[in-house]
């Protein structure tokens, strides 16, 4: 009996490795099914045009468990949309984007999700893969009387950024919130925009100083790098619930699932590993299972033969 137990354990472990390897690879074999959105202006329908509520966080990177938490919070607070403030992948390669898209499908927030590029998406290939998978890097989300102007400022504001700003000025937008990945390195840019648009607040991620409220161009600004990559003094990932109405902008910090850096780093490496690693796990699991099973059968046969001889 003592000999059977270790072999049974080996068989179960081997079977687990086999199944895990197969699941990891089959999960990533799906195509990038996230429909790229190239619209400069995107409309979110509101029953009350004077109010809007959305959820935002940034810098998720390898902390893929955050997606489930975001989905639950979005449903709980019945938000109009979710805004991810960049650095949604650790490396701007197709494998990482496949994981990201897979997690996006699993999130199921029940509302639109808008994604800004971070420096992790831009520095690797200039944002080419981001544009292919996600869509435009500069855009505006229109929700009733409120507009969230989403700008790619990773290398300063580009001509494409200013084009969206000029279009927004021509539309004479009402209340405007500006969202980007990094804080404005040039306050003159923020001041220039604020002189021509009624900016109510700013949001960005990127930094590792936790959830903070600041001031920019005379308006409130919030740092929300809560996805897990840059928690700073925070213990757990977090998101910001942003509620906008005639009284202004109210921001509430909400906790996301607990973050375990080592485990999520290992999880990310396993999920984004090349196919050879996943199929190697399948082969190793199958080999271990077959060897343990063969040895168990051999020992069982010998014990049966020995019992028959004694009879």
Image (cartoon, helix red, strand yellow):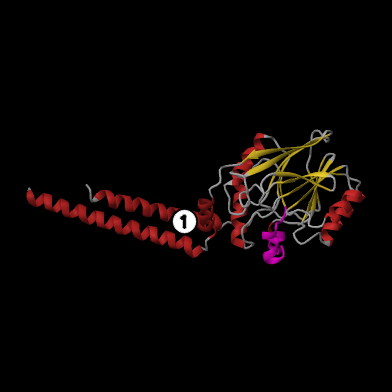
Quarter where residue 221 is shown: top right
Identify the residue at image location x=62%, y=53%: 101
Q: Is residue 159 left or right of residue 55?
A: right
Could you tell me residue 297's position as x and y percent? Answer: 24, 54
Magenta-colored stretch includes residue 184: no
- Image height check: is 156 above or below 58? below
Main SS of the magenta part reads: helix
Q: Is residue 31 visible?
A: no
Q: Is residue 146 visible?
A: yes
The mark total stands at 1
The residue closer to the viewer here, 107 or 311, is: 107
Could you tell me residue 276's position as x and y percent? Answer: 48, 65
Q: Is residue 266 left or right of residue 152?
A: left
Q: Which residues are magenta?
A: 116-132
Q: Does dot 1 land on a helix, a strand or a loop?
A: helix
Identify the residue at image location x=40%, y=52%: 16
Q: What residue does disc 1 label?
A: 22
């Amino acid at each position: 009996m003592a000999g059977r137990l270790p072999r049974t354990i080996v068989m179960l472990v081997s079977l687990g490795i086999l199944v895990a390897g197969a699941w990891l690879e089959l999960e990533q074999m799906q195509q990038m099914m996230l429909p790229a959105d190239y619209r400069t202006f995107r409309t979110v329908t509101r029953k009350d045009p004077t109010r809007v509520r959305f959820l935002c966080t940034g810098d998720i990177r390898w902390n893929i468990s955050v997606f489930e938490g975001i989905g639950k919070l979005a449903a709980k607070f019945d938000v109009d949309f979710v805004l991810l403030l960049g650095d949604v992948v650790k490396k701007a390669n197709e494998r990482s984007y496949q994981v990201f898209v897979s997690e996006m499908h699993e999130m199921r927030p029940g509302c639109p999700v808008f994604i800004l590029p971070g420096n992790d998406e831009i520095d690797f290939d200039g944002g080419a893969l981001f544009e292919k998978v996600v869509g435009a890097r500069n855009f505006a989300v229109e929700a009733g009387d409120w507009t969230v102007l989403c700008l790619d400022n990773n290398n300063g504001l580009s001509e494409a950024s200013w084009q969206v700003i000029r279009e927004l000025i021509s539309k004479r937008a009402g209340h405007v919130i500006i969202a980007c990945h990094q804080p404005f390195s040039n306050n003159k840019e923020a001041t220039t925009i604020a002189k021509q648009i009624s900016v109510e607040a700013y949001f960005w991620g990127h930094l590792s100083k936790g959830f903070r409220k600041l001031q920019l161009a005379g308006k409130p600004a919030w740092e929300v790098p809560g996805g897990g990559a840059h928690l700073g003094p925070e213990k757990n990932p977090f998101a910001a619930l942003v509620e906008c109405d005639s009284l202004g902008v109210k921001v509430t910090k909400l906790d996301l699932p607990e973050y375990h850096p080592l485990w999520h780093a290992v999880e990310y490496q396993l999920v984004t590993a090349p196919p050879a690693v996943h199929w190697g796990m399948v082969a190793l699991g199958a080999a271990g299972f077959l060897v343990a099973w063969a040895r168990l059968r051999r020992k069982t046969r010998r014990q049966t033969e020995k019992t028959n001889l004694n009879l």
